[in-house]
Amino acid sequence: MVDCEKFYQAIASQGVGLFTGVPDSLLKEICACITDQAGSNQHMIAANEGAAIGLATGSFLATGNLAMVYMQNSGLGNAVNPLLSLSDSKVYSIPMLMMIGWRGEPGVKDEPQHIKQGEVTLELLDVMGIPYAVLPDTDEEAHSVLQKIVGMARDLQQPVALVVRKNTFKKYVAQSTRFGSKNLTLTRERAIEIILGEISSDEPVVSSTGMISREVYECRDNNKQGHGQDFLTVGSMGHCSQIALGVAMMNQSKKVYCIDGDGAVIMHMGSLAIVGQYKGANLIHIVVNNGKHDSVGGQPTVGFDIDIPAVAKACGYQHAVSVNTEDGILQEMAKSREQEGVVLLEVCVLPGARPDLGRPVDEPIENKRAFMDFLRP
Ligand SMILES: Cc1ncc(C[n+]2csc(CCOP(=O)(O)OP(=O)(O)O)c2C)c(N)n1
């Protein structure tokens, strides 16, 4: 396996000036190492992977040095447009080093949302004309591949990629931890349990990517409820509020609940502006904010540094508040039912999850069918 600190040093010694990207579970160890080792002006966790390509481009324009962009292969989709219309050699020809976590690698067991993306990852890079190498899992070979691929980025003046398999990096113990300034006692799991307890059995729920949906699923199991009421947005990070909006627009007689995450909201924050323009009174957007990308290793988001309810209000939500206690959730869930427009409820929680948290056992297609039957019995 590859030693994170040595590999980070090897990347830095290639003259890489900025590290940016969106964290990934397969890159958790190297992401933690970058967070520890890179100075605050050398590392910026981006809102989404396309934005990271923009940051890398700006950094190159300012310095002539390569930046490194890390991402899960799910994020390649977000990056395709700037890769092809900004950094490609037929446009501005911007060299950079991408590091891509290969979820769903063929032959390696993974969750349904990673299968297709895993199958097409290398082909996507091929079709985009991005030279890549799969990172070997020994220090010596990894360093030599790094040197070659960075050399190609410089020679060709264009983005190149290192594709990273599961278990390539050795465990890295993070030194830096960042806790929010809020005085928090509530866990995300408990918050979700209380939220679901306040939603009637005939009201649809759309939940976000990662552990939020896993906790929704498990809570329904614990309560011996079915799963048809919930649409679990297992992939497609950042889009669950738009799914909920689509459901709400077509189903105005029912309250529709969206249970979102801070990282996901920030990834596609423009969607708040669209939800805010919706004139119906049946969409309640709950953002469970732990200030982290908890599901992929706990890297910080700016969730605790910004005022999400203020953003929502500025976008046109009728009512937007923040709570961090069980009573706060209960009071605001009751109030939200009385509002005549779209509501945002931010629930601030501690990071972390139970180590034995399960995963949905139903296939996404079964989830879709059950949810559609629930919406149109
Ligand atoms: C486009 C895309 N980029 C990255 C990921 C990897 N990913 C899955 S969950 C997650 C973090 C979600 O953070 P947040 O919404 O704050 O929820 P939390 O895990 O903290 O509950 C990330 C980065 C992804 N699934 N899709």
Image (spheres, helix red, strand yellow):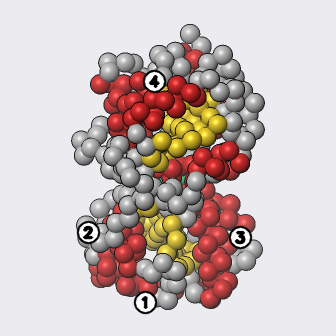
Query: How many residues crowd mark 3 within 10 Å: few (<14), some (14–19), many (20+)?
Result: some
Q: CA distance from mark 4 to mark 2?
A: 39 Å
Q: CA distance from mark 1 to mark 4?
A: 54 Å
Q: Is mark 3 within 8 Å of ligand 1?
A: no
Residue at image mark 2? 173
Residue at image mark 1? 13
| Secondary element at image label 4 | loop
Name the residue: 52% across, 71% down. Answer: 44
Residue at image mark 4? 198
Q: CA distance from mark 3 to mark 4?
A: 47 Å
User: Going by the image, does 64 lie left or right of 12?
Assistant: right
Q: CA distance from mark 2 to mark 3?
A: 36 Å
Disc number placed over residue 185 in the picture, else none: none
Observer-side mark, 1 or 2, equals 2
Name the residue: 65% across, 50% down. Answer: 311
Residue 85 x, y percent position in the rendering? 73, 66
Name the residue: 58% across, 50% down. Answer: 308
Residue 227 figure quarter: top left
User: Going by the image, does 314 lie left or right of 52?
Assistant: right
Q: Earlier in the sequence, mark 2 or mark 3?
A: 3
Residue at image mark 3? 86
Q: Nearer the viewer, residue 256 or 81?
A: 256
Q: Quadrant of the N terminus?
A: bottom left
Q: Earlier in the sequence, mark 1 or mark 4?
A: 1
Q: Nearer the viewer, residue 259 or 307?
A: 307
User: Going by the image, does 27 lie left or right of 95?
Assistant: left
